[in-house]
Image (spheres, helix red, strand yellow):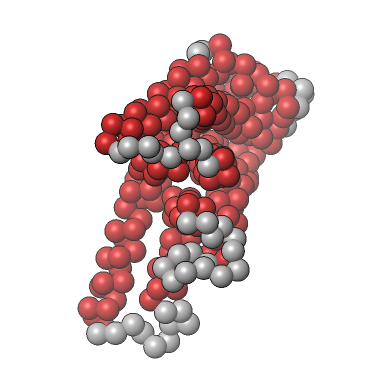
Amino acid sequence: MSWQAVARKDFRDASRSYLLWGLTIGFIALVSLAAAVLGWVQSNPTSTDILGVLHMLFQYVVPLIAIAISFGAIVNERDSGSLKILLSLPHSRTDVILGKVLGRTAAFVVPLVLGMVVPAVALLVVGVEFEAAKYFGYLLFATLFGVAFVSVATGMSATFESRFRVLLAVFGFYFVFNILWRAINTASFVIVLTLSGQWPSWMPLTVQETLRVFQLLSPTGDFQILRQALMNDVLFASEVSQGLPDFRLQLGAMAMLLVWITLPILIGILRFEEADL
């Protein structure tokens, strides 16, 4: 047995628990609700207008769903004792981690894609102006954003031995990086400017550049950078208007999302290899 077999089993288990179907219906309902609300308050909304409403929900809901799917990937099996049975089969601990993260990723991605594609067909049928590049570009970035939280939650599930510690870690991560991060950044800069009277001259970056670097450190900030560029038709453009993320910032956001997808799993593998089961 290998990581592929672990991933297939994990995905099948999600299917049997009706998790996939429940999430698919939930995503379809979410997109449909955004379209209905916008259609009620605005005449002739476009698919991009709907994404604007949807984004306010997605940046908070998508990570929570990813966490709910993934936080128990390893720790639940450790608590139940089934992890020892799984590891008694001819595959390594790394196989288990990789299989689990891929299985949970599939359990997240399939409902999200179906939940966006089905309403897209409905929008086309009813004659809503549909901007496919922006709609499916947003779906791609939302998928990467959610997969980053799948990776974080699965990595923490492999790192900590108790369910309580995993929950504390993943929801602490969500609260800090998804809700408080901008406030923390702003407060820290206000404190520095208040104490010194000006931005320190020894800093190699300006205030604005430093704020952007801090934004890149959060997966939510990365998602917002890419979404802003996409919606303003400057995605990876060489020249952008003032106030919009430039090419380097967009490239940095994409790179950091990939880091958030890979790094937690690597840390989880290292910790899990050393764990006493």
- Give the residue at x 52% y 29%: 124
Q: Do we see residue 1 in this rendering? A: yes
Q: Quadrant of residue 147?
A: top right
Establish if 144 lies above or below 28: below
Q: From the viewer's perspective, tell me whether residue 31 is left or right of residue 262.
A: left
Residue 8, position as x, y percentages in the image: 68, 21
239 or 10, which is in the foreground? 239
- Give the residue at x 59% y 64%: 237
Q: From the viewer's perspective, tell me whether residue 63 is left or right of residue 176.
A: right
Please state the total of marks drawn on the protein image. Answer: 0
- Give the residue at x 56% y 40%: 132
- Give the residue at x 38% y 76%: 207
Q: From the viewer's perspective, tell me whether residue 100 is left or right of residue 166.
A: right
Establish if 205 lies above or below 246: below
> Which residue of the protein is positioned furthest toward the left in this rendering?
194
Residue 184, position as x, y percentages in the image: 31, 60
Q: Quadrant of the C terminus?
A: top right
Residue 107, position as x, y percentages in the image: 56, 26
